[in-house]
Image (cartoon, rainbow, N blue to C red):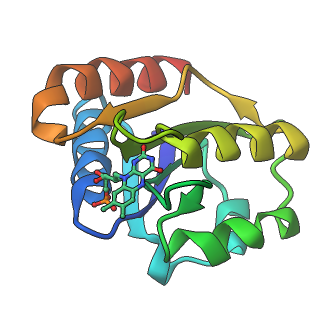
Amino acid sequence: MAKALIVYGSTTGNTEMVAEQIGGHLLEKGTEVTVKNVTNTFPEDLSENWDCVILGASTWGDSEIEFQEDFEPFYENLDKVNLKNRKVALFGCGDSGYEHYCGAVDLLVEKMGELGAVIMNDPLRIDGEPDDSSSDIKEWAAEVGDAI
Ligand SMILES: Cc1cc2nc3c(=O)[nH]c(=O)nc-3n(C[C@H](O)[C@H](O)[C@H](O)COP(=O)(O)O)c2cc1C
């Protein structure tokens, strides 16, 4: 059975909800899933024996991109992890009314490139309430499941 780790940072619960939904869809398709809040996760945990690592963070700030506050220190320490050729998928919640819509996801894409990770599919960006994007979340999770 393939094993996936989902790590999320979430302030008002939106990214958490998306993480749980992704986890549920992957589980339905037969993937063993661990969903963790970034507050309980060390970057080194990504090095364990996962077939894929899924990272999710919301974007805050205004004139410049700010990660969700719990995710920021985790992001800053990602360089410590060897993610070369590891399969990753990225998602985040945001609001397209802001200048840097889902900017945290863009920064994660860049970071994964620097670290040589393999991004499995187009990152998922949720605009506004996750409840309005249930079918997109399901479709995206299916893509990830197929690519594991
Ligand atoms: C003060 C503030 C700043 C925000 N800045 C951004 C931003 O720069 N880009 C963006 O896409 N969304 C921005 N948002 C929207 C949040 O990312 C969005 O509400 C998200 O769903 C929160 O997810 P979370 O509950 O998982 O933290 C901002 C929201 C607030 C309240």
Q: How many numbered marks, from 0 up?
A: 0
Q: Please identify the quarter of the rendering in which residue 133 is found.
A: top left
What is the residue that sits farthest to the front in this orientation? 63
Q: Please identify the quarter of the rendering in which residue 113 is found.
A: top right
What is the residue that sits farthest to the left in this orientation? 131
Residue located 43% across and 30% down the image: 124
| Quadrant observed for ligand 1 in the rendered image | bottom left
Residue located 72% across and 73% down the image: 44
54, 91: nearer the viewer: 91
Q: Is residue 146 above or below residue 39?
A: above
Quarter of the rendering occupied by the N terminus: top left
Quarter of the rendering occupied by the C terminus: top right
Q: Position of residue 24 (x, y in %)?
A: 22, 43
In this picture, residue 97 sits left or right of residue 132: right
In this picture, residue 21 sits left or right of residue 147: left
Q: Position of residue 74 (x, y in %)?
A: 64, 72
2, 102: nearer the viewer: 102
